[in-house]
């Protein structure tokens, strides 16, 4: 019997964070005793620690991952309605950030093996209005940053990396978020490095951008009551920063556990499903372990009937979302194929080895 009364959840945040509760309690008591709630020592400490972890020079804590993407675009002051290249199968937040900043998302189909932006399709979408490539390291695997960086350099484009699912992932030994000038992270509670509420950060090694970003997140102010820019209120919460400081030393262990679960799925799952492929030079952190099958919906229900919870990341392609019909034009068959066939199996830090084995056996049984 597994620890959840024969139910295998996709995610159990209470169980996931149980090991960190003594640390959280101490951090909360310290937070209360200080009486400093906004942009204090905890945020500064996390910014220093996360920058060091990713080998970036600077980290700027913000309110959430969407704000990290938006401010990461905003800091460049691109002309209005600039074209920003983005994968056609990304989570909607990546595209929303581009739209919210007054720019035009240009969708590029993914590689059907890695699910990341297909670097071979990049150049055909570049026009004189293209100003940046917003790379998404989907599911926890880095995109082909060597090729993407070369294309960006050739055409004078900025690279903004959406690292919301890839904390600790590397490509050829280099941390995601450090290939371009801006790396945007979300610390939503289910992420590999998750807070206990919304939280986000931007990393950069450009001092000028770092100074400007710190102002933009705080009403555009470098000095209290003096506003150099038109900014916003997007400050990483002091308490969440403390919790993130508590968990950051364990991020590598969290990633290794998820990789161990993924290894079980790799070895045990039937070849009747399409399994993730870890590319050479990549350290995949498996925020999501997705399989694909045309029988996705039937398999999902079959597993649910057996007490195994799964998720779909994501059921509707961005260009088919109701609210985006007038913004996203064109046809994207690869994206549609992924969204119609993908299923995410439990791969949480709270998922046990035994549970992963049970899940794999159940998936295999469906195809007998």
Image (spheres, rainbow, N blue to C red):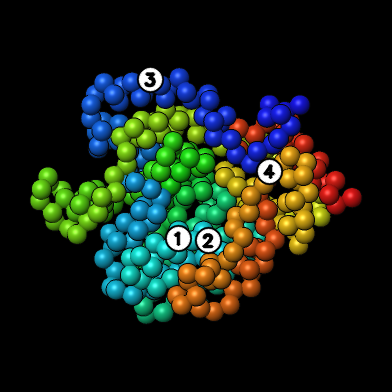
* Numbered disc 4: secondary structure: loop
**In contact (CB < 8 Å): disc 3 and disc 2:** no
Q: Is residue 72 visible?
A: no
Q: Nearer the viewer, mark 4 or mark 2?
A: 4
**In contact (CB < 8 Å): disc 1 and disc 2:** yes
Q: Is residue 193 above or below residue 133?
A: above
Q: Which residue in the protein does label 4 denote?
A: 309
Badge 1, how many Cα within 10 Å: few under 14, some, many 20+?
A: many
**In contact (CB < 8 Å): disc 4 and disc 2:** no
Q: Is residue 73 visible?
A: yes
**In contact (CB < 8 Å): disc 3 and disc 1:** no
Mark 1 or 4, nearer chain start: 1
Q: Position of residue 107 (x, y in %)?
A: 50, 71
Q: Identify the residue at image location x=51%, y=78%.
A: 329
Distance in Å between CA atoms under marks 3 and 1 = 35 Å
Mark 3 or 1, nearer chain start: 3
Q: Nearer the viewer, mark 3 or mark 2?
A: 3
Q: Identify the residue at image location x=45%, y=19%.
A: 22
Badge 3, how many Cα within 10 Å: few under 14, some, many 20+?
A: some
Relative to residue 359, is residue 329 drawn left or right? left
* Numbered disc 2: secondary structure: loop
Q: Which residue in the protein does label 3 denote?
A: 26
Q: Which residue in the protein does label 1 denote?
A: 94
Tag of residue 90: 2
């Amino acid at each position: 019997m597994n620890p959840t009364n024969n139910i295998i959840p996709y995610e159990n945040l209470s169980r996931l964070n149980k090991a960190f509760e003594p640390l959280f309690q101490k951090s909360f008591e310290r937070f209360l005793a200080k009486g400093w709630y906004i942009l204090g020592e905890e945020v500064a400490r996390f910014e220093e620690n996360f920058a060091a972890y990713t080998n970036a020079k600077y980290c700027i804590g913000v309110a959430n991952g969407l704000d990290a993407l938006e401010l990461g675009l905003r800091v460049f002051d691109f002309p209005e309605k600039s074209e920003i290249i983005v994968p056609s199968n990304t989570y909607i937040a990546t595209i929303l950030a581009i739209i919210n900043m007054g720019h035009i998302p240009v969708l590029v189909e993914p590689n059907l093996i890695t699910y990341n932006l297909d670097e071979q399709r990049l150049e055909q979408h570049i026009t004189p209005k293209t100003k940046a490539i917003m790379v998404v390291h989907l599911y926890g695997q880095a995109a082909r940053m060597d090729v993407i960086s070369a294309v960006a350099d050739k055409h004078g484009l900025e690279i903004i990396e959406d690292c919301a699912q890839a904390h600790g992932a590397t490509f050829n030994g280099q941390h995601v978020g450090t290939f371009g000038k801006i790396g945007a992270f979300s610390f939503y509670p289910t992420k590999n490095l998750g807070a206990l509420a919304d939280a986000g950060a931007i990393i950069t090694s450009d001092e000028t951008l770092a100074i400007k970003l710190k102002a933009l997140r705080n009403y555009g102010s470098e000095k209290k009551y003096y506003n150099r820019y038109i900014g916003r209120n997007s400050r990483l919460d002091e308490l969440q920063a403390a919790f993130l400081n508590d968990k950051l030393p364990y991020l590598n262990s969290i990633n290794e556990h998820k990789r161990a679960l993924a290894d079980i799925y790799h070895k045990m799952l039937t070849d009747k499903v399409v399994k993730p492929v870890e590319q050479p030079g990549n350290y995949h952190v498996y925020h999501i372990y997705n399989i694909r099958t045309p029988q996705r919906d039937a398999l999902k229900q079959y597993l649910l009937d057996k007490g195994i919870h799964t998720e779909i990341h994501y059921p509707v392609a961005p260009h088919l979302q109701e609210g985006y019909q007038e913004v996203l034009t064109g046809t994207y068959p690869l994206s549609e194929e992924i969204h119609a066939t993908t299923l995410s199996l439990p791969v949480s830090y709270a998922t046990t080895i035994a549970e992963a084995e049970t899940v794999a056996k159940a998936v295999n049984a469906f195809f007998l």
